[in-house]
Image: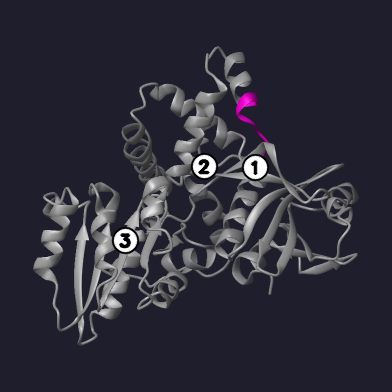
């Protein structure tokens, strides 16, 4: 098995080894959490004092580990007091009471723990309280554009960028290949159905499955647009589907818990506060979003690019909200400790009206923080427009804001 090291995540995981913290890898199914663990094993098992205790709950051979007692028995049988023990568990949420076991092992000498889960609420509520201050959560996302080039052995080009925008960044596509449309969409169909079945339908005992698919299709069609649960409910009713705002909110939270989507709140730039109403939905992998929407469509390019930019901003470590101005909207307000930037996203900027619309929103912000417009305008080289930096999408995806 050929494992490609995703250096960004390898370095993050390694940085928490020996810190007495449980390392929790979270993210949508098939984004590569398991391979981050397998890569860790491959890199560290060469160490003379390393003892790897690996449990993969998606394998039948570990089906017998159902509870924390089963987990304790298995780990105790494989611990080596004379070596450094690494406990690695894939899809840990399938073990009842796992947190009770791991909280105890975390305090023992010569033990580090790495686990994965496909549900964002695996550390919520009472469980989060039990492990409070004892874990470091790392979000694993689908491949960045640079990783996509590496996994598919491609050079940076218009064709490579188009394939990334169309097919997305699920690592498994490297095995399937991206030269046959039919195979790509079949693969994405299988991933979508698995996520919906295991992480939404089964986990939340959903009965109205047709409505579930209708809702996710609506969210895919309106990705990057301001929406509210009440507006969605009104639209559904206009289409003859009787539903409620509470039902919409619940279903949208299930999608977000499974990392299929992300709900992004609005931020009042003038008032400097979060707003309760309206927000935007983005998809964890653009390939899945395109599959749900029916594949490549000419009119989707701007929302696809905005979705890609949003997730790359998250990858770069920013906390991202949608900016609300009195006279309009700024796509993204991005924060890090001691850093704030504003980002506007466009497909092509090729006339004065577009320039006024995209740059004008940023010009109306009354502060001196850095402002960027990111677009796929052909032949664009990075340039300044009245103090606002204009970056080509490819430059942003390969070099960030450098």
Tag 1 and tag 2, C-beta contact below 8 Å? no
Mark 1 vs mark 3, CA separation in Å? 32 Å
Q: Which residue is mark 3?
A: 115
Mark yes or no: residue 379 visible.
Answer: no
Q: Which residue is mark 2?
A: 290
Look at 46% across and 39% down and name the residue there. Answer: 255
Mark 1 vs mark 2, CA separation in Å? 13 Å
Magenta highlight on residue 226: yes
Provide the secondary structure element on which disc 2 rests. Answer: helix
Residue 82: x and y in percent read 15, 84
Neighbor class of circle 3 (other Cα within 10 Å; few <14, some 14-19, many 20+) is: many
Q: Quadrant of residue 318?
A: bottom right
Provide the secondary structure element on which disc 1 rests. Answer: loop
Residue 170: x and y in percent read 42, 55
Relative to 341, residue 81 above or below = below
Q: How many marks?
A: 3
Earlier along the polypeptide chain: callout 3 or callout 2? 3
Neighbor class of circle 2 (other Cα within 10 Å; few <14, some 14-19, many 20+) is: many
Earlier along the polypeptide chain: callout 1 or callout 3? 3
Query: Which is more toward the observer, 120 or 390?
Result: 120
Q: Which residue is mark 1?
A: 224
Magenta highlight on residue 264: no
User: What colour scheme governs how the chains and residues are painted in the rendered image of this protein?
Assistant: one colour
Task: Specify the segment rendered in magenta.
Answer: 224-231
Q: Quadrant of residue 240?
A: top right
Q: Which mark is residue 307?
A: none
Tag 3 and tag 2, C-beta contact below 8 Å? no
Query: Which is more toward the observer, 266 or 162?
Result: 266
């Amino acid at each position: 098995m050929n494992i490609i090291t995703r250096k960004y995540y390898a370095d993050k995981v390694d940085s928490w080894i020996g810190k007495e913290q449980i390392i929790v890898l979270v993210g949508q199914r098939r984004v590569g959490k398991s391979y981050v663990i397998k890569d860790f094993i491959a890199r560290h098992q060469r160490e003379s004092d390393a003892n790897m205790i690996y449990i993969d709950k998606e394998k039948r051979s570990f089906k017998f580990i159902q509870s924390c007692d089963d987990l304790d028995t298995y780990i105790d049988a494989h611990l080596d007091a004379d070596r450094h023990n690494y406990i690695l568990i894939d899809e840990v949420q399938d073990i009842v009471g796992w947190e009770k076991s791991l909280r105890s092992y975390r305090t023992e000498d010569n033990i580090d723990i790495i686990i994965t889960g496909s549900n964002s609420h695996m550390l919520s509520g009472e469980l989060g309280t039990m492990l409070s201050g004892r874990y470091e959560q790392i979000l694993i996302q689908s491949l960045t554009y640079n990783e996509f080039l590496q996994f598919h052995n491609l050079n940076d080009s218009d064709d490579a960028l188009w394939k990334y925008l169309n097919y997305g960044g699920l690592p498994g596509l490297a095995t399937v290949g991206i030269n046959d449309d039919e195979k790509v969409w079949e693969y994405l169909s299988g991933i979508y159905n698995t996520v919906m079945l295991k992480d939404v339908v089964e986990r939340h005992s959903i009965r109205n499955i047709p409505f579930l698919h209708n809702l996710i299709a609506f969210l895919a069609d309106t990705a990057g647009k301001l929406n509210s649960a009440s507006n969605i409910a009104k639209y559904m009713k206009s289409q003859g589907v009787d539903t409620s705002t509470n039902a919409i909110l619940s279903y949208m939270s299930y999608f977000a818990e499974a990392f299929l989507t992300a709900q992004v709140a609005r931020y009042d730039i003038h008032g400097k506060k979060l707003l309760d109403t309206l927000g935007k939905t983005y998809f964890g992998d653009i390939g899945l979003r395109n599959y749900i929407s029916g594949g490549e469509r000419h009119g989707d390019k701007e929302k696809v690019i905005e979705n890609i930019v949003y997730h790359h901003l998250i990858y770069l470590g920013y906390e991202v909200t949608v900016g609300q101005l009195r006279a309009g909207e700024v796509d993204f307000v991005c924060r890090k400790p001691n850093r704030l930037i504003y980002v506007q996203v466009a497909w092509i900027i090729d006339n004065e009206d577009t320039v006024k619309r995209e740059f004008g929103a940023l010009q109306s912000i009354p502060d001196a923080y850095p402002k960027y417009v990111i677009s796929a305008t052909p032949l664009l080289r990075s340039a300044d427009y009245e103090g606002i930096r204009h970056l080509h999408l490819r430059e942003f995806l390969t070099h960030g804001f450098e």
